[in-house]
Image (cartoon, rainbow, N blue to C red):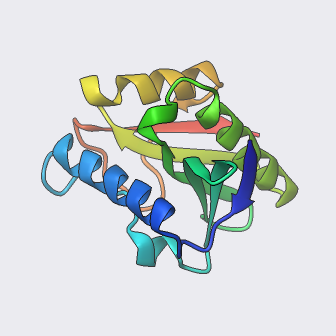
């Protein structure tokens, strides 16, 4: 698996991120989708990585700076054909290594609740993320979940 910073200009990554947004909208109440679109992912305070096996896109993840020592995990997505093959774990470890190299002391994420989000929540909790308060301007609702990992 080759993980590289992504310029977001390829059709594969654009299609995967479009799928991500579509799924978030289908499984979230109106006004509760906080996934970033392509223009937001291209912002200077966001870095995006994609995982590849040759010319096959396996997944992606992004890290948004929240200040000098905190970051937010965004747009974690495994391509449907590669789920449960270690892609998400490898991407998460890569993002955490970058966060540590930047001197971050905490990584946070926001996601949804309910059956569609349980696999992701279980994944993050197995890797040490803990439920916690809203952060970064998010408003807590009955739907969304906030997880944090001290680095």
- Give residue 124's quadrant in the image: top right
In the shown orientation, is residue 89 left or right of residue 117? right
Could you tell me if residue 132 is visible in this image? no
Q: Is residue 101 left or right of residue 47?
A: right
Placement of the N terminus among the 4 image quadrants: top right
Residue 82 position, x and y percent, is 52, 33
Residue depicted at x 37% and y 57%: 35
- Residue 140's spot in the image, x, y percent? 31, 45
Q: Is residue 116 visible?
A: yes
Extreme-left residue of the structure: 30
Is 75 or 50 nearer to us in this picture?
50
For the point 36% across and 51% down, the residue is: 20
Occupied quadrant, residue 7: bottom right
Residue situated furthest front in the rendering? 55
Side (left or right) of 95 relative to 9: right
Closer to us: 49 or 145? 49
Q: Is residue 105 left or right of residue 44?
A: right
Residue occupying the point 66% across, 67% down: 67
Picture quadrant where residue 85 is located: top right
- Image quadrant for the C terminus? top right
Above or below, 125 relative to 34? above
Expressed as whole percent of the image width and height from the top left, the position of residue 12 reads: 48, 60
Residue 104: image location, x then y, percent = 76, 54
Depth order, front residue of 51/95: 51
Q: How many marks?
A: 0
């Amino acid at each position: 698996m080759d993980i590289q910073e992504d310029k977001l200009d390829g059709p594969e990554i654009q299609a995967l991120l479009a799928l991500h947004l579509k799924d978030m909208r289908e499984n979230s109440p109106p006004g509760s989708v906080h996934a970033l679109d392509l223009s937001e992912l291209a912002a200077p305070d966001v870095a995006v990585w994609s995982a590849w096996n040759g010319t096959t896109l396996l997944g992606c993840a992004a890290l948004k700076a929240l200040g000098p020592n905190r970051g937010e995990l965004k747009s974690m997505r495994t391509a449907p054909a590669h789920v449960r093959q270690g892609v998400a774990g490898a991407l998460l470890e890569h993002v955490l290594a970058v966060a540590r190299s930047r001197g971050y002391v905490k990584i946070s994420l926001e996601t949804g609740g309910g059956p569609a989000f349980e696999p992701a929540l279980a994944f993050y909790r197995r890797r040490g993320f803990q439920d916690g308060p809203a952060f970064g301007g998010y408003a807590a609702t009955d739907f969304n979940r906030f997880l944090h990992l001290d680095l």
